[in-house]
Image (cartoon, helix red, strand yellow):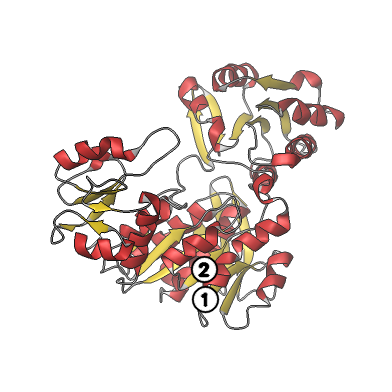
Amino acid sequence: MRRVSLEKIAAWTGGRLRGDGKKTVTEAVIDSRKASPDSLFFCLKGKNTDGHLFAGEARRKGSAVIGETPECDIEVYSSTEALADTASGYRKELKGAVAGVTGSCGKTTTVRMAETAMKGSFPVTASPESYNNHIGLPLALLGAGVEDRAVILEMGANHRGEISRLSEIAAPDAGVITFIGDAHIGCFGSRGDILDAKFELADSLNPGGLLIYNYDQEEVRERVSGYRKLRVTGFGFSPGAELRCAELKQWEGGSSFSLNGENFRINAPGVHNVYNSLGAAALALEYGITPAEISERLESFKLPSHRMQYIRAGGVSIIDDSYNASPSSVRALFGELLKIYPQKDIIAVIGQLNELGRFSEQMHRETGEFLAGLGNVKYILAGGSFAEPLLEAAASRGMPRENLVRFKDPGEASELIKKFSGPGRIAVLKGSRLEKLEDIIGNLK
């Protein structure tokens, strides 16, 4: 963040300036422990705490304070809205182009890949991991420097209207829609509502803006055809895609393919990561990066934590994909593993799939049936409130009941993994974020 005066921030937020308007700040913080003489501390109110309680600590560290009381340097009606308004005002002063990345899954990896593809050519700011909501996105935007030529922002949502609001703040010049699946379907209500929500990003682009999308998803492709005033780039394996992938080869640690004639190699396993790299490549091309540069840089890309990471812990082989999960991402992951590890017996460790609402039991049953239908899934360990429907469905598809076990927490799951592990077997961790399956790795170590 370049240096900005409190006077200007008060104008952006419509707040009442009570401190020294000439004081300038270079960063926005919401944690008083990170406050400094150059920071502006936003007193946000959460479910469990109130940032105003820590305003004194921030001030003792020399930080300016913005909040909802007269004691603040800038008094505002809502600290949360003030954060958004500050980011929106700052966005107007940025010279670099802003891109938004949304979708049911693949957002964070696509952002990281795009950042990797561009960073060797010019300064780039990208959202820190999962800074994708009404708090994280403004903070990520305020972290951009005036010298940045590109700002890449992750946009998440579990309700209609949220991406529209994030787009109002970010005013993106380009948008990427990675994939439409069933994540958060309990909050949205239907897959159609999920599609509508993700396309709020497309609706926010000015005429002539670039929309990058997954061409292989028919429902997405059909929706894009209505956006006549946008430039569009579809990526995928289908013949009509502007950015077409071909000659795909996969192995345990990654994939190789050609993209419009350029050879690519990524050290990230699975077709879903190929799709992520296509979205990132399309965005990098928009910023003037050559295909050869993109190819070279993506080969050095490393996946973010808890995403398809192969680990040995306590003598057990593990694939840690525990960052988050939905029914569609479970299908994508285990379908890929059948190709990548055809000779391995898989121990599927499934935490509860959250935010499915009235579809929860049905989708857990469908997940159990799917896993049981895969030839190399030999054991299923399931946790959470819907573990029994998942395991019952797997049993109905012929899996031996003794190979289907419910666990109450990551500690018990760790013991079960040790019990069932052995030569030629690999445990695969997949569950929603709240299930904390990553704790299993620490337990085994």
Marks 2 and 1 in Cβ contact (< 8 Å): yes
From the viewer's perspective, is 36 left or right of 346?
A: left
Residue 176, above or below 79: below
Q: Position of residue 311 (x, y in %)?
A: 49, 33
From the viewer's perspective, is 242 left or right of 399?
A: left
From the viewer's perspective, is 95 left or right of 265?
A: left
Mark 1 highlights which residue? 210
Q: Residue at x 49, y 67 (%)?
A: 281
Residue 332 in view here: no
Which of 430 and 190 lies nearest the eye of the viewer? 190
Which quadrant of the figure has residue 442? top left
- SS category of the residue bearing label 1: strand
From the viewer's perspective, is 129 left or right of 101?
A: left
Total label count?
2
Residue 150 in view here: yes
Residue 218, above or below 346: below
Q: Residue at x 26, y 36 (%)?
A: 54
